[in-house]
Amino acid sequence: MISNGGLLYTGTSGQGVYLSTDQGNTWTARNNGLPSGFPVFDLIAENSSFYVCGTGSIFHSTDNTANWENISLAGTVQATSVIAAGDTIIASFVSQISDGVYRSTNNGVDWILINSTSGLNDTRIRKFAYYKNTIYAASNGDLGSGNVYVSTDHGISWTAAEGLDDQGHNYPYNFLPSDNTMFLATTNGVYKSINSGLSWTNTGCTNAISLAIIGDTLFAGTGYHGIWKRGLSEMTGGSEASEYSTGIAVYPNPASEKIIIELKKYLSMGKPIVSIYNMQGQPLFQQTLQKDRTEFDIRGFEKGVYLVKLTGTNLTEFTKLVKM
């Protein structure tokens, strides 16, 4: 179920899409253009556009779900999930031609396969999210790695996350953002990330399938095991963390010539190592730091977004670097 413009929309397992204009008291079918008995796997709204996917197709509506247009990849057997990021649509397809994740920049007229050279190594994505210019993609635990991937360039390149355990048996269900924190409901528990999805921490509550936030409380629905709640302040330390409240600071950021990497907890890090990766996950630089403040020349780096990783005693942290 989603809300948009004060209205509620829901997808069903075999009756398509429904709309409520009175806070859920009554519902009206909105299935013109959808196949009869269409099972909805994912339903999203992006500004004035709606996208719905399920068995056989993915559909697009520009008139508040009154009418739907098929924009599927040719040969689609199933469209499992979809996300819209500006002018880019990204969807996970099971196809007679080639299973995988595809992107389109012309509203489904053409679809381009996102292959493994982009850093996205899974062909089955169970759930997408788009928040603060970052696309999150969570893969199936049975048909894929069960990991999360993030992209900051509309799906052109991806970085695999760290911290999701027992990935082969992990099934993601629901992303939910809260300020600078992203939560993810999975069978292994509710994970949180405070660095745009680059690393995750399991906060507990196994078999979580849905999330909601009311005030300062996070609620997790677990199906047969009830609904659980926990204060956000317990999980975020009272306020959402930023890169300057962790062990590493990179500035200026963005930068064009030189950066300074400052370690806030240098004395307790042992022999800290800083590594820089491109968004395909390829290592470009690594050095053991000998002091708490070190200057680096980045003029040899191409313009773009990079991942800075800090490894120390009982510590692994990430932040982003933008080269201008």
Image (tube, grey):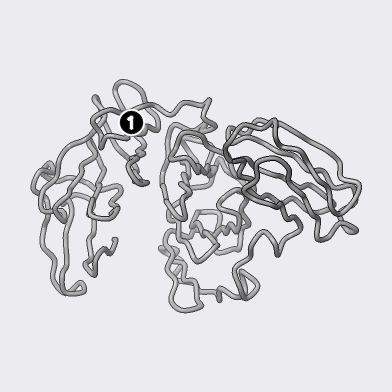
Q: Residue 154: where, in percent of width, then height? A: 43, 40
The number of numbered discs placed on residues in the rendered structure image is 1
- Residue 185, image x and y in percent? 48, 57
Q: Nearer the viewer, residue 104 or 19?
A: 104
Residue 251 is situated, as x and y percent measured from the top left of the image, at: 70, 52
Taking the spot 83% from the left edge, 38% from the top edge, the residue there is: 287
Q: In the image shown, does 179 or 235 lie closer to the viewer?
A: 179
Task: Relative to 39, say whether 218 is above or below.
Answer: below
Label 1, on which residue?
A: 94
The residue sitting at the front extreme is: 257
| Residue in the image at 49% along x and 35% along y | 144
Q: Quadrant of residue 74?
A: top left
Residue at 42% across, 68% down: 212
Q: Position of residue 133 (x, y in %)?
A: 46, 50
Kind of residue at badge 1: Val
Judged left or right of residue 131, residue 280 is right
Q: Quadrant of residue 33?
A: top left
